[in-house]
Image (spheres, helix red, strand yellow):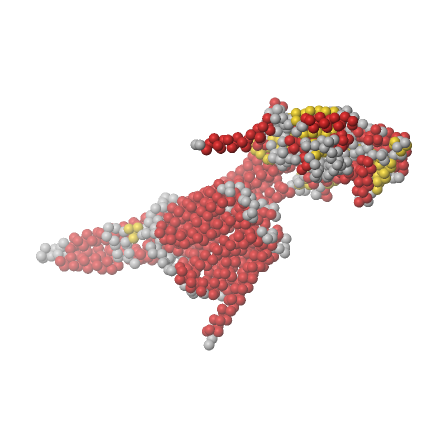
Amino acid sequence: MTGSSFATRIGLLLTALTVLACTLVTALNYLKFERLLLIQHQRMFTTIGADLVDTFERGMNIGVRLADVPGAQSLLDRAFGRDVDLQRITVADAGGRVLFDTERVRIGDAAAPALLPAGTTRRLARFGGLDWIGMPVVNSFGQREGSLLLGYGRAGIADRLTAVALAMAGPGLTALAIGLPLAWLAIFLVARPTRALFAQLAGLLAGGGAPATEEAMLQGLREAIHRHGATLDDAERQLEAIAARAPERNA
Amino acid sequence: MISTEHIVRRLVRNLSIIAALVLLGTVVAVSFAALGAFDREVRPAIEREAAVIGVVVANPLERALGLGIPFDELVGTSEYLADMAASQPAVAYLVLTDLAGQPRATAGPAAASFEPLVPPAVLPGDGMLRRALPGIYETAVAVAAPGGRPQGWLLVGVSRAAVDGVIEDTSWDLVIVLLVAVMLAMELLRFVIDRTVIGPLSMIERMARRLSAGDCTAQAVTGATDEAGAVARAVNALVRRLGDRWAYLEWLAAEAASAGGRAAREAAAVLDGLHDRLRFRDGGAVPEPLAGSASAARLPLFLFVVAEQLSTSFIPLLGRDLARGAPPFLSPDLLAALPISAFVAAVALATPYGGRLTARRGPRGAILIGGGLAALGYLGAALATELLPFAAARVLCGIGYAVLTIACQAQMALAARQGRLARSLGGFTGAVMSGAVCGTAIGAVIADRLGYAATFVASVALVVVVMLVALRAIPRGLAEAGAAAESVLAGARAAFGNARFTALLLLAAVPAKVVLAGVIFYLAPLALRDLGESQAAIGRNVMLYGLCMLPAITLGGWLADRVRIGGGLIWGGALLNGAALLMIPILPEAVALPIAIAVTGAAQGLASAPMLAAAAATGSGSTPLLLSFLRLGERIGSVIGPFAAAWLLTRGDTVWAMGVLGAVTALAGLAYAVVQQAGRRAAAMGSAP
Amino acid sequence: MRRRPLVAAAALGLVAPAVARAQRRPRILMMLFRGWEEACDGFRDYFAARRLDVELVVSNAEEDLSRVPAMVRQAQAMRPDLVYLWGTTLTMAALGPWDAHDPARHLNGMPVVFNIVTDPVRNRVVRSRAAPGRPVTGTEYIAPVAVQLRAMESYRPFQRAAALFNPRERNSIVTLEEMAEQLATRGAVLHSLPVPLADGRPQPDAIPGLVTAAREAGAEWLYIPPDTFLNEHRAVLTAAALQEGLPSFAASERFVAFADGLAGLVSRYYSVGAFTGFKAEQILFGGVSPAAIPVETLSRFSYLVRMETARRLRAYPPVELLRIAEAV
């Protein structure tokens, strides 16, 4: 049979659909896992931050201002080593001026207003390529004395996500590589009777052989073609006979 | 005997099986790989968190040691650990042991599952020990005075519960994606097979019938390069061959006629004799006009319903979020119902115009217009940040929905004029319901991962696909020129003057839709969210409605036809539905909600076909008009539903509101039963003198 | 077009007072009793940390009550935007009782904040803590009795406590009465042991004997009220408690920081000063009337623990407490 087959179309359709479904499942799984890790990451850094805030608030209980909490800078530096994704810890006063910072050159700068917690509730933000948790530092009469800003990266998460993506992509592609050729084969096998039917029809219409089946439509068609052929043959014979007769007298 | 129908049926069946198998195989393979990877990759992340918690929790202990308190005399460690475990949601247990691994203090929800640790002689580089216990990853942190030697271990067990939850959720995703992919595959297969096999075969069959009758005036439409195209070309070749021979005979007759009058008469007689058996068209055969098949409208309809239902499970939640900024004197619950009701009201009001538009522009034009409106609506919904613009966008979606569904229905009716109207319109319900199931389910998953706006954008993309499919698959053409100009007013008077019809409408049809829009689409998502369910889980629950309704519709129709208990199904369905909703306040919500949703789907499905039959059988006025009044009533019910639910919410909680709606439904069902019995008795007395 | 100048004028009219206020530094007259100390640091630093510009004028009584009338006259002449008063004695002398205010002798017509004052209600500085009843507000520095009790219990639960006190000090009597009441509701007992008087003066020699008596009566804690006499003899008192193996708990810093007391829940003068600064800010910059600002203690106190005493008593603080405590 020349030209494309309807089976090709169905094969393409199924291929597209399978690839789409696999992509969708992969993407959904990936996003799900990413969210799981992001939540866990955030929880972890909140733990670190809350512990630091606790220490600062206790420090102020001694009766000093936030700026004078003893050993504050070394406290930040120590906490900084707790996780590799921790990128920066900043302590700012109530006006947003940086008092302590793991990047010491920033001390005295103004902290980004988008990171500072509003009132005494935490703020989560994404800023400058880092995730930030802004936690209020509250003094002994319930006022926000300053804020602790903790910025962390996603490198650790990215590694895990890449690993998960690769772990899904490998078997996924393998499954497609095995499944799709099998599907194509099966489609063409299943399509054979239908294609045979079309082939018989085409052959029949082209005036070829008799249909192999006793299917009513094919038989009817065959009979009609023969009948019409015969009718036309008959008419042609008659007309030729008429034409072949000698010319009439009056001609 | 092998017939074409048999071949085609087997083809459809086998292709469906192949599609299902391939999708199942690949998707399951991908998901298994994902679950394995999750398990592997999540462990280091959990251990990292455990280490951080360990360092933080150990800090005061180390401070105590640093202050000179001996390890054996640490006071209040159990209380301290219990306090810390309570403040850290991920912690399964915290255990303080001495250097030999003997527990000194234990705390945490999974403290019982702790197994004693035997510290190794050589410690790893970072001084932490790690091990995996059933359901828990544990990290042990050495406890030492600052600068001193370790005096004990703090063991932090972090639960895998969060991961296991994700894995369970992922398995659900898998089921949903498979379900949707298979249903989508079935719709697409149906569409493609219809265009490439069934449609051409039926055309060839028509041609064969014509040829058998000697009609050679029509040509087959060729276009595709596949087998069907080849056959069509062969048909045309045959027609042309016959036509050529006819032309030759005409020429021959003319030649013969030139011989003289008798020959001319004889030749004309031969041609006349031929004319009785074969008909040709002067100037050659012309292509037979294509009506387009019923299935051509099914795919756009299915895809469009998917697009619309993507947002079903979160619209009340989004409405509630957007209503937060509203003035305080308006209840946010009541306002949250506004977008839903605006949509349904728009659908109800736009339906007649949709019919008129379809009549004037033809189904294809109407689908394109409706699709355009709906796409604009979804885009607006994606961009809306306030309640009123959002409701306005939903009104656009509603108009689009009304126009598009009417157009598809018209196209189906048009294509199936030859006697299979009922089955074709059944296809309409089928497409709408399977679209609803697919859309609700996958929409919830998308919204859960990508957010509400992204879901609306996905709807826009789907609507664009719908329009493209309509452009390709539905032939340009006009619907009936003079759409039935029946007097709507007179019809309405006749219909509503009929007590049986009014009872059916008010006691069965309207309450069912009030429950659907008020409970399934409004209260249930809110209640599930309040239970802490994820967006995906809410979608799964809402999907149950459609999933249970699909088989119930078929069953209900079958029962009504065979057993003739249609009336009983209507009020029985209402009672069942009411009972299911009344169960919600009694049982725990997490159990009762899915059951109630499923039973509501089944009950309403059972009653749906009998209700149509009963409406048509009341016999006041024309059937289409009665059906359209029934539809209108249902849509009004859908408008009332969310508002009734929201009003109840201002008086009590979600559970109570669902219970009240359930009671109303059950009472309405009982009332319908009474009315029906009375009517039957009256009829019996009338017929028996 | 003609409207514009009018609009501009109106806007100016609205803005003008604010500009004027911003340009003039509020003047605070600080009337001190014992000279400048940590509470004053806290007060001053509060404004500095928030970049609030104020002018501080200091006037010191040098522990001499007879100077107060002159200081009051000076204040009336100066008419500052706010008066800051330090200490119970000075505050009572400068303000008089809220219900027997004499404009001739007492400060009037200007807002007042007080600092380091014990029980301003019983001392009739204000009518009640929630509603001072006059344009006067301030801070207290002794933790509420209930909070102190909780602090003692979190260190070590008890059924019996004992307390020495100077019967001539109203403060101590009031505090112990309140404590006894609160303990009674929990089924616990407080033994109050007055220090015997000779010639109207309490006798320091009696202290060790009273502590022994307290221990023999089964006391588990020795509570030390904010008592001036005991403060003077804190070394004897805390050493006697240590000798008897009796843990001691104080309501003010010195018994722990500068003696052998085991623990105490105290306010840091610096923090109390900053808190007073916060109340002053509300008056000067927030436009709030002092009469509408409640008199409060800090919401968080310093928990002092003397580790050496803990070691000798073998009464180590629980870990939970060590998280917040400050070891001295």
Horizontal relation, residue C171 to residue B552: left or right? right
What residue do we see at 66% from left, 29% from top? C81
Locate residue B73: give its quadrant. Answer: top right
Q: Position of residue B59 (x, y in %)?
A: 72, 32
What residue do we see at 84% from left, 39% from top? C161
The number of numbered badges drawn on the structure is 0
Q: Residue furthest left?
A: A250
Horizontal relation, residue A44 to residue B29: left or right? right
Quadrant for the C terminus of chain A in the image: bottom left
Locate residue C298: give its quadrant. Answer: top right
Q: Residue furthest front?
A: C104
Q: Is residue A195 visible?
A: no
What residue do we see at 36% from left, 56% from top? B483
Q: Residue B459 versus residue C321: which sits nearer the camera?
A: C321
What residue do we see at 46% from left, 60% from top? B612
Horizontal relation, residue A191 to residue B48: left or right? left
Q: Position of residue B457 (x, y in %)?
A: 48, 42
Q: Residue B6 versus residue B654: which sits nearer the camera?
A: B654
Q: Residue furthest bottom?
A: B689
Q: Is residue A30 visible?
A: yes
Q: Position of residue A52 (x, y in %)?
A: 67, 31
Q: Residue C303 versus residue B225: which sits nearer the camera?
A: C303
Locate residue C97: give its quadrant. Answer: top right
Q: Residue furthest top?
A: A105
Q: Position of residue B50 (x, y in %)?
A: 67, 36
Instruction: Indicate whether B677 appears above or below C86.
Output: below
Q: Residue C46 versus residue B88: which sits nearer the camera?
A: C46
